[in-house]
Image (tube, helix red, strand yellow):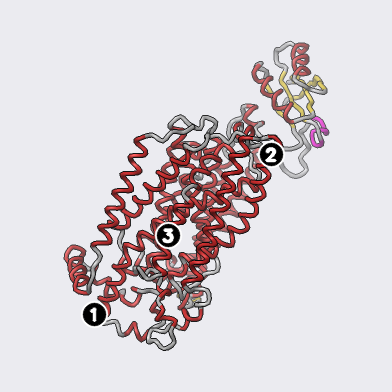
Amino acid sequence: MASKVVHALYTDDDVLMDAVKRVRSEHYHIEEVFTPFPVHGLDKAMGLPHTKLAITSFLYGCVGLTVAITMMNYIMIEDWPQNIGGKPSFSFLENMPAFVPIMFELTVFFAAHLMVITFYMRSKLWPFKKAENPDVRTTDDHFLMEVDVANHDVEKLTNFLSDTGAVEIKIVEKDNH
Amino acid sequence: MYTLSNRLRLLSIILMVVGAVGLLAGFLTTPGSIEEVKQHLASHDDHGGGHGNDHSTDDSHAGNTIHAENSLEKDAHSGDAHYEHVLHQLQNKPWASLYVAAFFFFMIALGVLAFYAIQFAAQAGWSPVLFRVMEAITSYLVPGGIIMFVILALSGFHFNHLFHWMDPELVNPDSEHYDALIAGKSGWLNVPFFLIRALIFLGGWALYRHFAIKFSRKQDEEPTGNKWYKKSFKISAGFLVFFIYTESMMSWDWIMSFDPHWFSTLFGWYVFASLFVSGITVLALITIYLKSKGYLEFVNNSHIHDLAKFMFGISIFWTYLWFSQFMLIWYSNIPEEVTYFITRIEDYKLPFFGMLAMNFIFPLLVLMNSDFKRVNWFVVMAGIIILCGHYLDIFNMVMPGSVGASWFIGLSEISAVLLFLGLFLFIVFRALTKAPLLAKGNPYIEESKHFHY
């Protein structure tokens, strides 16, 4: 099924922000906004739901902490106890301070790496993937807003968009996949 | 303009009076002789069961590092010698509780002063709406500093024996109490130089505060050209350099010298983290209080969110420094170093580990969630726990070197906190009435009003 969208290009992030707010207040549907750099507050202006990535990060951190505790307990206490610095390793609790740096590092390691991998998967990013942005200038100095035409009047919509400060407006037939 | 309500004024005066009376009672009930100590310990045995045994078994640690190397004297601890030791500790107790509370409230003002200077030096755009609250909190710096100096001077002139190293016998080679280590440090740790240093620290900080406030007020009167703002920027940057050196030395002098044999090279940072997080917490609490009373209408929940982020971040930073200090000493297990933690773990188990839970685990779990940092009652609850935790932190630093195993959070400790809490509230909220609550001349004030995260 093909659908019609309007691509409106902007050259300034403040203009874009105001435009996004106005487009939303007129009840047009913004499909996506492509920007060369993260624009602060854009997600809120677009009305995107809050990311759940932080929760996954916390859970991954808990996994990392558990892995570290289990690993250090097995290596240093159960499998091969040694007497290091007059501290015989027969009890996890008594030797715990020595393991804290490892517990901390693995917590951070798991949280960071697994969160990034989750982010890639959620964003459907993988090596050799074809770029999705419709205009290469969005990687340089242009901002692109993709507005769904749906059953609105195209003329009225384009006039409204150029009113919001768009420097270029294109109507595009888009293949939905 | 803020007006001090009568209820708040009354509350602070009541706190001061109750605190003063309680502290006086604490001073009057200290035992004057060995016989009274014996009675005191015996009555403790009656209702405490086993508590008295703690006293005798912990004998070797009672003076902690102080006697650790004077093994001859330690071995001689028998019969009345032990009771005499406990007598000195109990006589120190009200002084030490006065000292802990005085330092605790002083360090809040000092922490906010450093935070204020950082805002100027960093040209922060989010915080100028909070400047008048910060300025009011730092108004406690001068009275609090004078109180600290008076207590230090009283110790220096031997009205009390808080600082063991001040005993002239210890540096006298002919005395039987001669202590080679303390004598070796006497070039730095001697009473006149100690008091001169205290004057330099306090004088420098008070000087910065005086001019920073003056420039801030002048900037309101004539904001064109930002002449006064530029001056604020310059003195703030200069102050921060002065501060980080003097704060470090202050922490050696005023806290680390309670254990004169022991030393730690990151102690200055550790105390800094404690005073910084306490200061920011008080700033957040007072801001939330004023907002709840209808003032500070230009402060939004993004400002509270940022303050809570600082509370969270600096709590983690404090833990990082605490653990860096603890783990190296614990692992290397060198007797003259590790005695510091052995004393604390054996005699101060509850405050020592309790403080870790309050200063690390609690803020970590409560303030981790981004949304909770915007909920006022969450911030207030976390803030109160953090403040109690950092009081305990100072308590753990000061008490083992001054009262040893005879510690107890009782009448004199609580009264001293109430006394200084009342004084702090009175001075800070009175200072709030002195100037408009918005530093309207600050060039970043519009940005700060619209600050939105």
- For the point 29% across and 67% down, which residue is it? B90
The residue beneath circle 1 is: B80
User: Is residue B289 positioned above or below B22 on the image?
Assistant: above
**Disc 3 and disc 1: Cα gap in Å?**
31 Å
Q: Which residues are magenta?
A: A134-140
User: Is residue B206 positioned above or below B264 on the image?
Assistant: above
**Disc 2 and disc 1: Cα gap in Å?**
70 Å
> Picture coordinates of residue B180 (x, y %)?
46, 83
Q: How many residues crowd mark 2 within 10 Å: few (<14), some (14–19), many (20+)?
A: some
> Picture coordinates of residue B116 (x, y %)?
57, 47
Q: Locate residue B157: give its quadrant.
A: bottom left
User: Is residue A8 positioned above or below B279 on the image?
Assistant: above
Q: Chain of mark 1?
A: B
Of residue B416 and residue B366, the one placed in the foreground of this image is B416
Which label was assigned to residue B102?
none
> Picture coordinates of residue B113 (x, y %)?
54, 50
> Picture coordinates of residue B425 (x, y %)?
40, 44
Label 3 residue SS: helix
The residue beneath circle 3 is: B394
